[in-house]
Image (tube, helix red, strand yellow):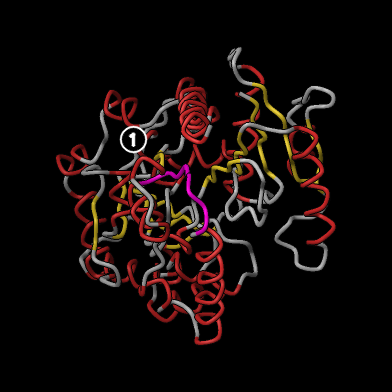
Amino acid sequence: MKILLNASTINVGGGLFVTINFIKESLTASLEHVEWHYLISEVVDKELNIASVNLPQGSYSVINRSPAKIISRKKTLRKINEVEKRVSPDIVYSIGAPSYVSFDSTEALRLTNGLITHLNSETLSCYGFIDRQKFLTKSFIQQKIVGRSKYFVTQSDTAKRGILKLTGESPNSVKVIPNSISKTFQDYKTVTNTNVNENFIFCLAAPYPHKNIDKIPLVAHGLKESGYHDFKFILTLPEGSKVLNEINQESKKLKVSDHILNVGKLTQKECAEWYEKSSVVFLPTYLETFSATLLEALFMETPIVTTDFSFNKDVCDDYAAYFKPGDWRGASEQIDRILSESSFRNELIMPKKVFEDKFKSFRENYLETVEFLNEVYEKES
């Protein structure tokens, strides 16, 4: 089976991390019946070079501009179509969706964008009128594009339900393959054993409004009012960002500045250090498909407090303390309970066997993806 991996739209974020690891597995996993060809963005090409990953000569093409870019779209599509004709793949696996390309070959898409599959009113409420309209317009356009496709890989049951609603296809057309834990965390946990001696509450999130990091002063105030004084929220926001300035102002007003510390952007190893020395991971998000923060916290055995949404429960099951979206007093109470009750804290630690059964390695996820692509190929042949 000849597969064309399309990573022409991959430029930032978790998708880039997944793409690099997937390509590594495609080069090292021994599957005689699979022949890979690669269509990659300049960013992916650069990251592969940094990671010293060498693609076989003649097996890849670098796309200078994403097909999502309207100005250069015609030229980009021409090059992509030329590559497809030359390779003549049995199937195309687009690791970012939408791919913005109409391939002649059967295409399977990896779709992990909650804006497309399960955008909710709570998320929209975090934005002003103009930004809300932008979200809705972008979501509508992408839903229309994605809705024409038939086969998908995604990360959660919530996303799968959204895809099936968009496409009207059978459940077998969508394969759910959860995230994998990074080797950085596996290596860190193997060689370290930090004792938690301070009540750090780790909040690993980007400064998007729907992440609700700006509500942390309210949660800190609720904790303080309940009689708790020995705690500190750890933020990972860019210095000088609008959200951080708002948090600083609100913290002063509520007199909780001493309970909030921003440490800025972190490496994966630094994240692992904070997970291990924190008493709680707090993720007040309104929209995710599969949060890597939750996966990492479960692996590092740090109790989680997060919003009561199905996409969070897809990851954590019963191993998290949930609060109703917008109930910041409820969030404070859940954190308070973890800090105060060791038995409750222990209930939220996912057993190692449960974790290993639920979340597979990069190699296992790669093999499962190839198996699904093979099923699609045989079905369409």
Left or right: 179 with respect to 240? left
Q: In the image, is residue 231 above or below residue 63?
A: below
Q: Position of residue 279 (x, y in %)?
A: 33, 45
Residue at image coords 82%, 63% = 72
Residue at image coords 42%, 37% = 177
Q: State the count of labels.
A: 1
Q: Position of residue 139 (x, y in %)?
A: 51, 69
Quarter of image, res 345: top left
Quarter of image, res 250: bottom left
Which element carries disc 1, helix, strand or loop? loop
- Which range of residues does the magenta coloring cover? 148-156
Q: Where is residue 340 in the image (x, y as percent from the top left)?
A: 19, 50
Residue 294 belongs to magenta span: no
Quarter of image, res 227: bottom left
Left or right: 359 with respect to 267? left
Residue at image coords 76%, 45% = 41
Q: In the image, is residue 121 above or below residue 345?
A: below
Residue at image coords 46%, 29% = 375
User: Which residue is under mark 1?
Assistant: 301
Q: Please rate how many residues cluster around mark 1, counting C-alpha atoms within 10 Å: few if below 14, some from 14 to 19, many from 20.
A: many
Residue 150 belongs to magenta span: yes
Residue found farthest to the bottom: 129
Q: In the image, is residue 186 above or below residue 242?
A: above
Left or right: 186 with respect to 351? right
